[in-house]
Amino acid sequence: MIALLLRDLRLAIRAGGGFGLGLAFFLILATLVPLAVGPQPDLLAPIAPGILWLGALLACLLSLDRIFALDLDDGSLDLLATAPLPLEGVAATKALAHWLTTGLPLAIAGPALSLLLFMPAPAVPWLGLSLLLGTPALSWIGTFGAALTVGLRRGSLLLSLLVLPLYIPTLVFGAEVVRRGAEGLSPATPLALLAGITLGCIGLLPFATAAALRINLK
Amino acid sequence: MTLTITDLSCRRGETTVLHGVTFAVGAGEALVLRGANGAGKTTLLRTLAGLTPPMTGSVVPDLCAYAAHADGLKGQLTVAENLTFWAHVFGTRDIAPAVVAFDLAPLLSRRVADLSAGQKRRAALARLPLTGRPVWLLDEPTVSLDADNVARFAAAAGAHLAGGGSAVIATHIDLGLPGAATLDVSRFAASHAPDAHDPFAEAVE
């Protein structure tokens, strides 16, 4: 499984791998919002947590359809399914590789970009922490969606429709953590719920993902 | 080690393609699958590899190394990186014998995307010895190989058989493997045609 993780990371960094695609999208979104809404701090500061979380979510969505589709096209997915690795392990490894190349950079870049939106200083560390805790759920849910739609032509549109509703709890609690942090309230409750969602996704979804892959490979 | 298959029924989608497939391949033996296009050779191999669950009968996917039509190589990685990855997945460490058997040494540091179809095919076939599994399931292994490389592949398959392995090969050309039996897949064709009026068949598929 370490070999698979290293291969996926290497593929993401090589030409055409799509590493940085989500990050660039996130960056552009955060710069476009002040241009669209107007650069007034009193206008931008209240919406900054929501905008940044929404941006991170959409950036995550961009690269989801590549998780399994490329492996299916070149036949590696069939070979991985016949390899001694459990398919659940393949699913978890793929999700981890997706998070390392998409979610983690977003969590690191988020606090820096929050300055563009005049986010209050006390909220900035909470944004980083909530993204760090919340984006794994986005990757694991997205991997499940990718397994459901693998092999479908133009499946990426269906993938977005399937996955976006499942992202709602993460988005709600993630943005709530930052909003409470900005207002000086304790963000402990939404943070705990966010971490709970992520842990639940990491623990349960690889099994669902593997089941979906088995059905789609038949 | 003998691969014994008894009364296996295979399906593709919702259609039963093969019915009552029975054969045995012992150590050092090869079974060549024949049959017209669409007779079910690929379906049988995918069932044996454990990708499609059989409708009746049982298979032992853990013994089998499957080589499909698709090469299963990553274009952005070099040949060496691709082979090392599969070697790690299957728990073998040394890719050197496979590299020698398929004459891949000059290609090791080249990206797979830059190779010709025949060279990709050789790199894909070199994966088989790396699996360390006794039964090779080969689906048209010689597609896009030239005569020299067909001979090279036949030699590698022969060495695998001589080492106590076995192989099930769907192919239209004669590889000249010693001890190769032939099985005509169309003998097992499922008799009933798929029900054209079933409104759910397409949706389920």
Image (tube, grey):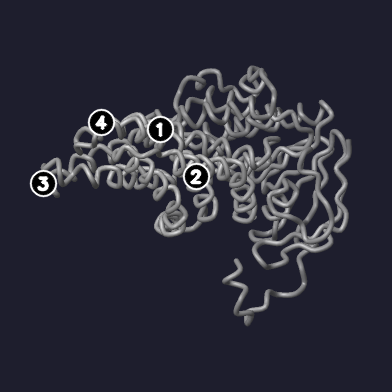
Query: For the residues marked 3 and 4, what is the alpha-carbon distance in whole angstroms?
Result: 20 Å
Q: Residue furthest front?
A: A185
Residue kind at label 3, given as amino acid type:
Gly
State whether discs 1 and 3 lie on one chain: yes
Residue marked by disc 1: A129
Q: Chain of mark 1?
A: A
Judge whether B40 appears above or below B174 on screen.
Answer: below
Residue located beneath label 2 in the image: A193
- The chain under label 3 reads A
The residue at the point 79 percent across, 33 percent down is: B134
Residue A38: which disc?
3
Q: Is there any visible trace of residue B122 in the rendered image? A: yes
Circle nearer the N terminus (2, 3): 3
Q: Which residue is the site of mark 4?
A: A121
Q: Position of residue B103 (x, y in %)?
A: 59, 22
Find out whether the residues at labels 1 and 3 contact each other: C-beta distance under 8 Å. no
Instruction: Name the quarter where the C terminus of chain A is drawn.
Output: bottom right
Identify the element where label 4 is drawn: helix
The residue lying toward the viewer, choosing from B176 and B91, is B91
**Numbered mark located on residue B13 in the image:** none
The residue lying at 40 percent from left, 37 percent from top is A130
The crowd level at tag 2 (other Cα within 10 Å; few <14, some 14-19, many 20+) is: some
Question: Disc 2 or 1, which lies upstream in sequence?
Answer: 1
Name the amino acid type tagged 2.
Answer: Leu
Q: Report how far apart the C-alphas of labels 2 and 1 lie in the structure.
A: 13 Å
- Which callout, 4 or 2, points at the residue further toward the start of the chain? 4
